[in-house]
Image (tube, helix red, strand yellow):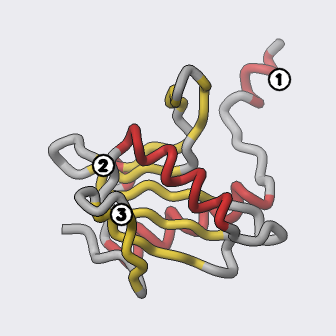
């Protein structure tokens, strides 16, 4: 019983979690994003189906600045990965998207009027 309550406080370091933890550190150290504005693995409902995003960074007004989709290093980034984050963004309405497997990183800025995203070299430093 005690072990079960302790285990709930720890995160299992799967390959995908390893990528997410490194992304979080990179966002904090290189893009000046506050951990207080980050949200990890929260549920959202899309067309009646429960989904979980990997990481969201909020603006100070509560809108979503960035949504991140992390894959394990052994998983190739494909069109399906971009489709997945685009579906999540129908709900979150993030300004920026990031998709990574820890080896390859893709950054996009949303073009809501054109219903598309524009690829970037990186995401901007948090303002």
* Residue that badge 1 annotates: 3
Q: CA distance from mark 2 to mark 3?
A: 8 Å
Q: CA distance from mark 2 to mark 1?
A: 36 Å
Asked if marks 2 and 1 touch (Cβ < 8 Å), the reply is no
Does residue 50 appear to the left or right of 14 in the view shown?
A: left
The residue under the point 37% across, 53% down is 57
Q: In the image shown, does 123 or 39 lie closer to the viewer?
A: 123
Residue 32 location, x and y as percent?
31, 70
In the structure shown, which secondary structural element does the residue marked by tag 1 occupy?
helix
The residue under the point 56% across, 20% down is 48
Q: In the image shown, does 73 or 29 lie closer to the viewer?
A: 73
Q: Residue furthest bottom?
A: 121
Does residue 66 appear to the left or right of 83 in the view shown?
A: left
* Residue that badge 2 annotates: 64
Q: Quadrant of the N terminus?
A: top right
In the structure shown, which secondary structural element does the residue marked by tag 2 occupy?
strand
Residue 20 location, x and y as percent?
61, 59
The residue under the point 60% across, 26% down is 50
Residue mark closest to the camera, 2 vs 1: 2
Residue mark closest to the camera, 1 vs 3: 3
Q: Which mark is residue 96?
A: 3
Q: Residues within 10 Å of mark 3 (few under 14, many from 20)?
A: many
Residue 41 location, x and y as percent?
57, 40
- First in residue order: circle 1 vs circle 3: 1
Q: Which mark is residue 16?
A: none
- First in residue order: circle 2 vs circle 3: 2
Q: Quadrant of residue 103?
A: bottom right
């Amino acid at each position: 019983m005690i072990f079960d309550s302790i285990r709930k406080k720890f995160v299992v370091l799967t390959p995908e979690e390893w990528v997410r933890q490194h992304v979080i550190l990179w966002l904090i150290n290189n893009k000046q994003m506050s951990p207080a504005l980050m949200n990890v693995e929260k549920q959202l409902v899309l067309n009646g189906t429960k989904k979980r995003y990997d990481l969201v960074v909020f603006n100070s007004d509560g809108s979503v600045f960035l949504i991140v989709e992390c894959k394990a290093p052994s998983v190739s980034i494909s069109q399906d990965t971009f489709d997945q984050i685009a579906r999540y963004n129908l709900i979150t309405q993030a300004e920026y998207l990031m998709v990574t497997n820890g080896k390859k990183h893709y950054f996009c800025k949303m073009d809501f009027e054109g219903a598309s995203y524009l690829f970037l070299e990186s995401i901007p430093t948090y303002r």
